[in-house]
Image: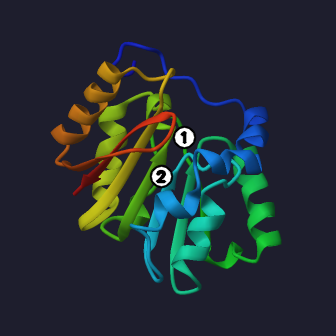
């Protein structure tokens, strides 16, 4: 169960195609959202990348010396992301990780991550306490975590419970963010 009492549901794969729409840039421009936090050479962890809407721009931002670790529970999403990354010429800096229901499987990246993106995915986690614990352990000291959840799917109260769950794991609130159609916060380890 989620902190808001709802049962988590994973985004169906077919919706991934809609999420790649160029029109999405009107509300969620990756460079505007991520540019202030991501630099060349960084290691970035993206939870729930789907088919790579944010992953490819992240790969360009971190450059050839950086790394984007994309973790998803759906193998087909990761396969499509891999094809898109190869076509875009950024596959060499992307690591794909197939998560399982109770683990993100990111133990190999403990204390190596500079920035984490969890965009429209935390509400899908079956155990948010474990979810934030695993992310926290992957992050370097003072690294940032951007959590953004879709309004309509997540209430303000549910989002506040999610933030409290993250705070209980050791995160501090850096700032609230204004991302269209979403409720968003920037957290620091």
User: Which residue is depicted at the point 56% across and 45% down?
Assistant: 48
The tag on residue 100 is: 1
- The residue carrying pointer 1 sits among few (fewer than 14), some (14 to 19) or many (20 or more) residues within 10 Å by Cα, namely few
Report the residue at 59% width, 44% height from top. Answer: 27
Q: Position of residue 28 (x, y in %)?
A: 58, 48
Residue farthest to the top, as pictured: 5
- Mark number displayed over residue 105: 2
Q: Secondary structure at mark 1?
A: loop
Mark 2 vs 1, N-terminal side: 1
Q: Which SS class for mark 2?
A: loop
Tell me where residue 77 appears, x and y as whole percent. 72, 46
Is residue 102 in sight in this rendering? no
Residue sticking out furthest to the front? 26
Q: Residue at x 59, y 55 (%)?
A: 29
Q: Please state which of residues 124 and 183 is positioned toward the viewer in this rendering.
A: 183
Pointer 2 with pointer 1, Cβ within 8 A: yes
Q: Position of residue 109 (x, y in %)?
A: 40, 66
Separation of disc 2 and disc 1 at Cα?
7 Å
Q: Residue at x 51, y 61 (%)?
A: 32
x and y percentages locating residue 44 in the rendered image:
46, 66
Q: Is residue 91 left or right of residue 5?
A: right
Instruction: Give the quadrant of residue 113.
Output: bottom left
């Amino acid at each position: 169960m989620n902190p808001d009492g709802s049962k988590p549901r994973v985004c169906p794969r077919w919706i991934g195609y809609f999420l790649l729409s160029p029109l999405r840039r009107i509300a969620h421009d990756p460079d505007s959202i991520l540019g202030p936090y991501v630099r060349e050479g960084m290691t970035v962890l993206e939870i729930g990348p789907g088919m790579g809407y944010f992953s490819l721009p992240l790969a360009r931002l971190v450059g050839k010396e950086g790394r984007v670790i994309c973790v998803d529970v759906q193998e087909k999403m990761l396969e499509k992301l891999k094809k898109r990354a190869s076509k875009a010429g950024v596959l060499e800096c992307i690591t794909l990780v197939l998560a399982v229901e109770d683990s993100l499987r990111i133990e190999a990246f403990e204390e190596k991550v500079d920035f984490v993106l969890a965009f429209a995915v935390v509400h899908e986690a079956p155990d948010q306490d474990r979810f934030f614990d695993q992310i926290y352990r992957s992050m370097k000291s003072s690294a940032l975590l951007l959590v953004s959840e879709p309004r309509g799917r997540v209430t303000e109260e549910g989002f506040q419970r999610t933030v409290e769950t993250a705070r209980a794991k050791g995160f501090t609130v850096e700032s609230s963010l204004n991302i269209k159609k979403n409720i968003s916060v920037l957290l620091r380890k």
